[in-house]
Image: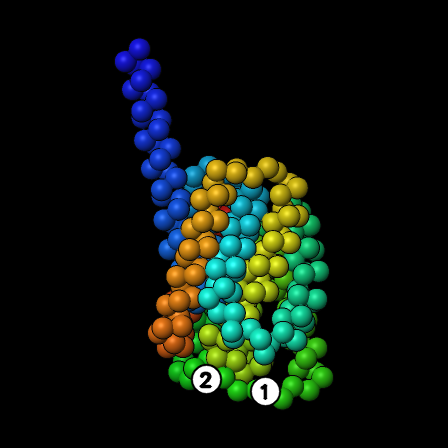
């Protein structure tokens, strides 16, 4: 009897510690993601995989949780969305088919090549952000011709494919694309990324990925709670500290995402 009680207590302690760890990982990774405009998968997704969750289930759980991140961030930054509904519709109309396509082919593609491509892009974004001191610090309205608009929509579709198949770092790409194409400051671009990528892209991808395998409901609840609170907290901090904090965090997260994906790619080739 004492032996059985010992096993039960140890099991409970282990379960409680694991649950608390998952919540903290979710909260802090999504707080930084809310400030930088993406990158929650840098910590959250590998942590789920290391805890024993299969890749596709971990990816689906991560995507559903980042819907809560999008809701938390959008709730705090909803005022900045009112003037960008037209751009949001473009991101949804042309990005969602890409997400669906990416989630549909994720079982049949070689992940290491996609990791490598995204790693290189993320590292280049980090250096570009570092070298351009005024990038995303103020907002202006770029006048776009037809070629620019078509280029933007094609890139949105491609990023949507990456979002559906990899997830990690795609929010950062959309944020940078909005800054460069429309002349948005980081705060405005991140608010739009939360609303479109965080909520609609990730929810759509999660639904398609959940058909591959079941999702652990206990883990999902912890992730959703951590993502929502982290998203709201990060959005609140970005409102208080402004674009300088956002740019610094964006640069750091881009670099870390790139290095993480590069290592993951190299390891998968070995």
Q: Residue at x 34, y 22 (%)?
A: 8
Q: Which residue in the protein does label 1 denote? A: 142
Classify 132 as above or below 214.
below
Q: Based on the displayed image, in which of its 4 quarters is residue 67 positioned?
A: bottom right
Q: Which mark identifies residue 138?
A: 2
Q: Position of residue 237 (x, y in %)?
A: 37, 68
Question: In the picture shown, does residue 94 fall above or below 109?
Answer: below
SS state under label 2: loop
Do residues under tags 1 and 2 come within 8 Å of each other at their CB atoms? Answer: no
Tell me if I can see residue 244 in this picture. yes
Residue located at (70% from left, 83% from top): 147
| Quadrant housing residue 5 | top left
Residue 159 image offset from top left, x and y in percent: 61, 64
User: Furthest residue to the top?
Assistant: 1
Q: Nearer the viewer, residue 45 or 5?
A: 5
User: What residue appears at the point 48 percent right and 60 percent down from the top-left corner?
Assistant: 72
- Crowding at label 1, few (<14), some or many (≥20) Cα neighbours within 10 Å? few
Residue 209 x %, y %: 63, 46
Which residue does the image show at 66% across and 41% down from the upper left? 211
Q: Which of the pair 22/236 is nearer the observer? A: 236
Could you tell me how far apart the alpha carbons at marks 1 and 2 are, in whole angstroms?
A: 12 Å
Q: Coloring scheme of the render? A: rainbow
Please tell me which residue lies in front, 101 or 206: 206
Horizontal placement of 35 versus 213: left or right?
Answer: left
Taking the image as drawn, is residue 259 in sight?
no
**Quarter containing the N terminus:** top left
């Amino acid at each position: 009897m004492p032996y059985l009680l010992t096993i039960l207590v140890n099991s409970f302690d282990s379960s409680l510690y694991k649950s608390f760890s998952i919540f903290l990982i979710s909260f802090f990774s999504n707080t930084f993601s809310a400030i930088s405009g993406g990158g929650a998968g840098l910590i959250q997704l590998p942590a789920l995989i290391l805890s024993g969750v299969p890749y596709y289930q971990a990816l689906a759980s991560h995507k559903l949780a980042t819907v809560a991140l999008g809701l938390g961030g959008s709730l705090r930054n909803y005022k900045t969305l009112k003037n960008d509904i037209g751009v949001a519709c473009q991101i949804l109309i042309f990005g969602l088919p890409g997400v669906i396509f990416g989630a549909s082919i994720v079982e049949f593609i070689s992940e290491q090549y996609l990791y490598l491509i995204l790693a290189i892009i993320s590292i280049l974004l980090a250096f570009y952000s570092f070298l351009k001191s005024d990038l995303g610090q103020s907002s202006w309205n770029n006048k776009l011709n037809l070629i620019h608009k078509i280029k933007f929509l094609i890139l949105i579709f491609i990023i949507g494919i990456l979002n559906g198949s990899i997830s990690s770092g795609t929010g950062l790409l959309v944020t940078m694309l909005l800054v460069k194409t429309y002349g948005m400051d980081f705060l405005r671009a991140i608010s739009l990324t939360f609303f479109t990528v965080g909520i609609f892209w990730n929810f759509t991808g999660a639904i398609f990925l959940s058909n591959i395998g079941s999702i652990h409901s206990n883990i999902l609840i912890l992730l959703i709670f951590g993502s929502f609170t982290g998203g709201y907290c990060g959005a609140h901090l970005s409102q208080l500290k402004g674009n300088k904090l956002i740019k610094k965090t964006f640069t750091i997260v881009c670099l870390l995402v790139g290095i993480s994906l590069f290592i993951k790619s190299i390891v998968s080739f070995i």
